Image: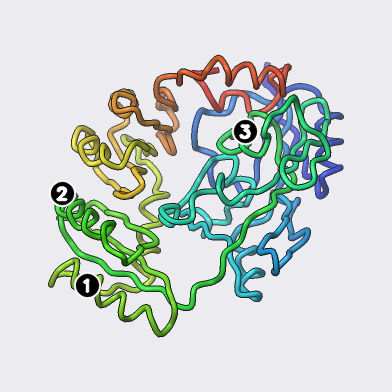
Amino acid sequence: MTRAAPTTLRPTTPKEVRDAVLDTSGRLAISGAGTARQWAGRLAEVDATLDLSALSGVIAHNPGDMTVSVHAGTPVRELQDELAEHGQRLAIDAARIGRGATVGGLVATADAGPSALVYGGMRELVIGTTAVLADGTMVRSGGHVIKNVAGYDVAKLMHGSYGTFGPLVEVVLRLHPVPGSTACVAVDGPVGTATEHVHRLMASPLEPIAVEWVSGDPGTLLVRLEGGVETLPHRTGRLLELLGTDARESGEHAWAEHAALTSGSSGNETAVVRIGCAPTRLVPLLAQLPATAVTAGLATGVATVTVPAASVTEVHDAVAAVGGTSVLRDRPAALDVPAWGPAPSALALLKAIKTRLDPGARFAAGRFDPWM
C-alpha cells in the first residue's frame, strides 16, 4: 500500500498555526525556508507539514530599546535590510542566511556564525518567544508572560530543539548597531601556526569579531574587525603587524567563500559534521579526524568538518571523548549512521520535558534519533 503524501499547511498568523495544530491529528513536521532540512536526524514519516514560510514580517521594532519582535518565518536577510534603515542589525552571521534562513529556523537549529565569538548565538540574542504546544497552548516566554509552563524557560528550550517541542510563531530579539566600518585580514598557514596567531591575538587589545581557520594548502586564518571609520584603519594596521609580513587585507569576498565552505554539502562518499568543544581541545581533536575539509573557529571551539561517510561514528566518538558535541549537517541519501554522538547525561530530563510538552510525540519525530 502506498502512503499518501503528507498534507502541507501554510498558516499566515499565529492563530492559524494554533488552529492547524489542533485540527490536525498525527505527526507534524515543521519547516521554514528548508535550508537545514538535512541537518540532525532524518525526519520520520509525518501526516502533515507545517510550513511557516508565510508567517513572516516585523511585528514591532523599538529602535530606542534596540529590540524587535518578528514572526518566526521571517528571513533574516530581509530583517537585516529593514533594520539597517535604522542603523541597527541582528548580530548573527550564520552561513545559510544568504540562502534565506529564517529567524525561527536559526533558533530551532541553534545555528550561529563566526561573530558568535563576541555576540553569541541566537540563545544570547533571543529575549522572548511565543510557541504553540501540542495541546494548542500559546506560551510566551520572556517579556510580558502570558502563561508559564511549569516553570520552563521555553525560549531556551526552543533553542536547538529542531521543532521537537512545537513551532515557534514569534521571536523577540536584541539588536546591535551597524558598525561604521569592517575589515578582514588573512594570513596563510597550517592550523598549528594559526593557533599561535590566535593566542597572541586574543591576548591583545584588538578585539576581533571573528577568528576562523579554513583548511587548504596550507590553509588560511581569517580575522575580522569592526569599528569606527576613523579608528579602524589604525587597528587593522596593528593586526597586520601582529600577524606578520605574510598577512594581508582581504575583502568581504573572503567571508562569502568561508560561508560557502561552512554550509557545504556532502558528496556521494562524504558527510558534513558540525562539532563543538573547548577551544583548547579543538586543534588536537581535528588532528584525530579523517577530515578532507575544515572550517574552524579557533577561539570558539566550533568547527564544520567534511569526512568520509564511513567515518561518521568514529567522528562522533572522538568528539565525545573530549567532552564535545557533534551533529550531522549533511550526508549521502543512502547513508545510515547516527546523526548525533553518544547521548548526553541529561537525556532522561530531555525525554521528560518532551513528554510534558508533547505527550503524543507529534512534533519533529526522528530529529533526535537515536536518542529519542
Residue 330 drawn at (x, y percent): 43, 38
Tag on residue 192? Answer: 2
**Badge 2 or badge 3: first in the primary sequence:** 3
Mark 3 is on which residue type? Answer: Leu
Q: Residue at x 34, y 43 (%)?
A: 301
Image-based side of 160 in relation to 50, left or right: left
Circle 3 residue: 157
Q: Based on the displayed image, in which of its 4 quarters is residue 157 positioned?
A: top right
**Badge 2 or badge 1: first in the primary sequence:** 2
Quadrant showing the C terminus: top right
Residue 333 drawn at (x, y percent): 44, 32
Image-based side of 65 in relation to 80, left or right: right
2 over 71 or under it: above or below = above
Image-based side of 291 in relation to 93, left or right: left
| Mark 2 closeness class: few <14, some 14–19, many ≥20 residues within 10 Å | few
Quadrant showing the N terminus: top right
**Badge 1 or badge 3: first in the primary sequence:** 3
Q: Residue at x 29, y 49 (%)?
A: 298
What colour scheme does the image use?
rainbow
Tag on residue 240? Answer: 1
Q: Based on the displayed image, in which of its 4 quarters is residue 105 positioned?
A: top right
Residue 121 drawn at (x, y percent): 51, 49
Of residue 253 and residue 43, the one placed in the foreground of this image is: 253
- Can residue 217 be seen from the camera position used here? no
Secondary structure at numbered mark 3: helix
Q: Residue at x 53, y 28 (%)?
A: 42
Marks 1 and 3, how far apart at CA: 42 Å
